[in-house]
Amino acid sequence: QVQLVESGGGLVQPGGSLRLSCVVSGFSVGNYAIGWFRQAPEKVREGVSCIMTSDGSTYYEDSVKGRFTISRDNAKNTVYLQMNNLRPGDTAVYYCAAQLFGSGFVCNDLPPYEYDYRGQGTQVTVSS
C-alpha cells in the first residue's frame, strides 16, 4: 500500500524559509513522480512543483520559481521542498502526491493534485 507522510510545516515570517519532507513507502520500482500541491482557504488547488524519481527532472509553477527547490533522496525514499523567501501568499496546506508514469512522461503531464496518491498535508503559515 502506497503511503506518503509529510512533515516540516509551521509558522514563519515573510522572507523566511521552511523545508518540507515527504517520505514515500509502498511503491515498487518504476518511473514515478512526486509532486507538491497546495490548498488555501477559498482558493483553488495549485500545483507547486514535481520531480521524476528516475531522472530527477523537475517542474515549478511560475510563482515559486527561484524561491522553491524540489529534490529527492532515493535511498531514503524522501522528497524535499525547500521554500525560501516565503510570502504571505504561500500560506496553505501543502500536500505531497505520487503518480506512477509510463516511460516518456514528465511529471507535469498531470497536475500533482490529480496524482493517484497523496499524504495528509502539512500547514504552512507565512505571517508577521
Image (tube, rainbow, N blue to C red):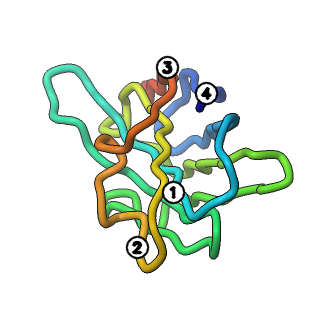
Which of the two labelled residues, at mark 3 and mark 1, occupies the earlier sequence position?
1
- Mark 1 Cα shell of 10 Å, populated few (<14), some (14-19), many (≥20): many
- Mark 4 Cα shell of 10 Å, populated few (<14), some (14-19), many (≥20): few
3 with respect to 124 (left or right): right
Three-letter amino acid code at the position of disc 3: Gln
Q: Is residue 104 above or below residue 8?
A: below
Which numbered mark, 1 or 4, is in the foreground of this view?
Answer: 4
Three-letter amino acid code at the position of disc 1: Ala
Secondary structure, mark 4, is loop
Which numbered mark, 3 or 1, is in the foreground of this view?
Answer: 1
* Pointer 3 residue: 120
Which of the two labelled residues, at mark 2 and mark 4, occupies the earlier sequence position?
4
Three-letter amino acid code at the position of disc 4: Gln
User: Quarter of the image holding residue 71?
Assistant: bottom right
Q: CA distance from mark 1 to mark 4?
A: 17 Å
31 with respect to 38 (left or right): right
Q: CA distance from mark 3 to mark 1?
A: 18 Å
Which of the two labelled residues, at mark 1 and mark 4, occupies the earlier sequence position?
4
* Pointer 4 residue: 1
Q: Residue lying furthest bottom in this view?
A: 104
Disc sitting over residue 105 in the figure: 2
Three-letter amino acid code at the position of disc 2: Phe
Q: Are marks 2 and 4 in contact (CB under 8 Å)?
A: no
* Pointer 1 residue: 33
Disc sitting over residue 123 in the figure: none
Q: Are marks 3 and 4 in contact (CB under 8 Å)?
A: no
Residue located 32% across and 49% down the image: 47
Q: Are marks 3 and 2 in contact (CB under 8 Å)?
A: no
